[in-house]
Amino acid sequence: MGCRFLLSLFFLGIINTSCQVAENPIIWADVPDVSVMRVNNTYYMSSTTMHMSPGLPIMKSKDLVNWEIAGYAYDRLVENDKMNLENGKEAYGKGSWASSLRYHNGLFYASTFSATSGKTHVYKTKNPETGPWESHSFEPVLHDNSLFFDDNGRVYMIYGGGQIKLVELLPDASDIKPNGLEKVIIENVNLAFGEDEVGGLPGEGSQLHKINGKYYLFNIASPKSKWERSVIIHRADNIEGPYEGRVALQHKGIAQGGLVNTPDGDWYAMLFGDRGSVGRIPYLVPVTFQSGWPVLGVDGKVPQSLDLADNSKGIFGIVASDEFERDISDPKLPLAWQWNHNPDNNNWDILENPGRLRITTARVDNNVLLAKNMLTQRTFGPKSTASTLIDISQMKNGDIAGLIALQNKYGYVGVKKEDGKNFIVMVESKLDMEGEDEKQGVLAYNDLSTTSKIIEQVPIDQENVHFRIDCDFDTDKALFYYSLDGKEWQPIGKPLQMVYTFTKHFMGYRFGLFNYATQEAGGYVDFDYYRIGKVTKQPKP
C-alpha cells in the first residue's frame, strides 16, 4: 500500500499514520554511471570515481534510498606515471569509467574499463565488503561495458558508443572467448530519436537486463537538436537481436543506469542527472511495464517524492567526519576517503595520542594538482561544509598545506611558509579558457597549464590553525574561512565560482587535505580532525 494512499486516508480521518517518504535526488553527491542490483534483501550499486584510489566503489542499501559504501573493487587500478602522478603526468577525468555490477553463482562481479591502463577490467569476490577481489584484465578497452550472464551459461559484454557491440567472454568472465560470438547488435542507438535527430551524444552507458525472457538494453543519448540526456531502451527476444528501440525518458537530463526490483516485485530505475559543480547525482525512478516495455517515471517525469523510507540523512553513509582516532594496530581510513590518484604509502601515517593524519612531502612540485597524498571526500548538496585543524610547526620553506575545494577550477585555504615565516592564504586557480561548449553548458579548460593566484594572505605566528570551506550548490559558490581558536571564524579571500568541467576532472567538487613542497622535501603537517556537515548558516567572525 503506497504512502500517498495512506496519507489520503489519514486526511480523511480513516487512519492515523506518520508515513515518511524518500526525496529525489537519492544521493545529492557525485555518484555517476550507476549500476544497481539486488541480492536477496540487499541492494548493491557501483559507480565511477575515475582517478581516485581506491576505486570502483561498491555501495549497499536495505531500502534503495539510504546507501553506504561497502568497499572498493580495487585499491590501485594500475601502476603507471599517470595514476602515480609521476613525471608531470596525471589521470584527471580518466582512470576507470562506467562500471557494471553483477551477481552470478555466489560471486559478485564488477567490470570497468580504462584508457589509462589500456584495458578492460573484471573483478570478482564472494563478499564485496571484506574481499578479497580477484582481478582480471584484458585488451581491448571495451567502452561502457555491461557484463551479462545469460541463462544458458554463456557470458557476454555489451559495449560501445553509438554503435553497440556484443562480445562473448570465457565462462569466468576473465577474458574474451577465443572464436566466441562477436557482432554489432545495434547499428546506431540514436536512431530511436528519429533519423533527423541523429548526431547528439552517441548512445552509450549500456546496461543489459533479462526479464521474463526478454532482453532490455538501457543507454544514455541525446538528440541532435538539443543537448538533453535521455534514456533509450532497446528490447529483443534474443540477445543477438533484432532489437527495437524507443525513447523512454526525457526529463531534466536524468539518464544512464538500469533496472532493479524489490522483493515485493516493484520496479525502479536508478539513473543520474548532471547538477552543476556538485557533479552527477543519482535519482530513483519508479517503473511499470506496459505491453512488454518498461515505462519510466510518473507521466513521463521523475517524481520528487517516492513511497519509500526517509532518506534525509542518507548522505552520511557516503561521506564521514574523521577525528583520526584509531586502534593503531589497524589504522585504516574510513571508506568515505579516497586518495587523489595513487598514494605514496611511505609518506602518510595515522598517529595516536592524539589521533592525527600526518602527510610528509617527499618531492618538490609546482602545482597543488600534482601534489602526492591529497586525501579527498565528496562534497554534497544543497550546501555542505568541511573543516580541519592543522599543526604547521614542521613545515619547511616553500611548503603549502591546507583544505581545498578540488576540481579543475579549484580554491583552497591553507598555510604557506616563506623565508621562515608562515602566512594563511586563500588561493584560487587561474585557467586559460579554451572555449565554451554550449551543448554541455560548461567551460573547458587546460588542466596542468593551470596557474594560481593568492587572493589574500594573513601572517600567522602560532603552530595550529583551523580551516573551513562552505560549498553552496544552489549558487555554485565556495566560501573560505580560518580560525585561530576553532570558535571565531574569519572569512578570507573571495568566493570561488565553482565550475564542473567535462574536458578535465569530469567529477564533482571534492574536499581535500593536502601538503606539498615547492622548494625542499621532508616537511610534514598533522591534521587533527576532518569534520563535515550541512550548512545551515554562515559563521560570524
Image: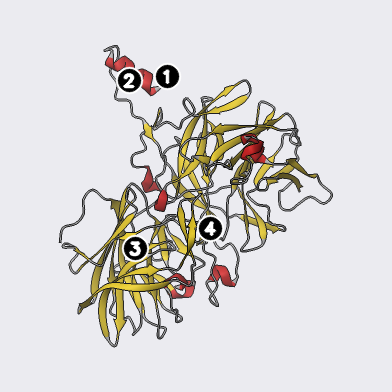
Position of 271 with respect to 331 (left or right) is right
The total of numbered circles placed on residues is 4
Viewer-proximal residue, 391 or 194? 194
Q: CA distance from mark 3 to mark 2?
A: 44 Å
Q: Residues within 10 Å of mark 4 (few under 14, many from 20)?
A: many
Q: Earlier in the sequence, mark 2 or mark 4?
A: 2
Q: CA distance from mark 4 to mark 3?
A: 26 Å
Q: Circle 2 — which element?
A: helix
Q: Residues within 10 Å of mark 2 (few under 14, many from 20)?
A: some
Q: Which residue is mark 2?
A: 7
Q: Which residue is mark 3?
A: 324
Q: Residues within 10 Å of mark 3 (few under 14, many from 20)?
A: many
Q: Circle 3 — which element?
A: loop
Q: Which residue is mark 1?
A: 1
Q: Earlier in the sequence, mark 4 or mark 1?
A: 1
Q: Residues within 10 Å of mark 1 (few under 14, many from 20)?
A: few
Q: Circle 1 — which element?
A: loop
Q: Nearer the viewer, mark 3 or mark 1?
A: 1
Question: Which residue of the protein is positioned furthest toward the bottom in this rendering?
Answer: 419
Q: Nearer the viewer, mark 2 or mark 1?
A: 2
Position of 34 with respect to 185 (left or right) is left
Amino acid at the residue labelled 4: Met
Instruction: Please give the name of the residue rendered at 49% of the width and 46% of the height, measured from the top-left corner.
Output: 59
**Residue 50: mark in rendering:** 4
**Residue 353: mark in rendering:** none
What x and y, as percent, mark residue 20?
A: 33, 29
Q: Earlier in the sequence, mark 3 or mark 2?
A: 2
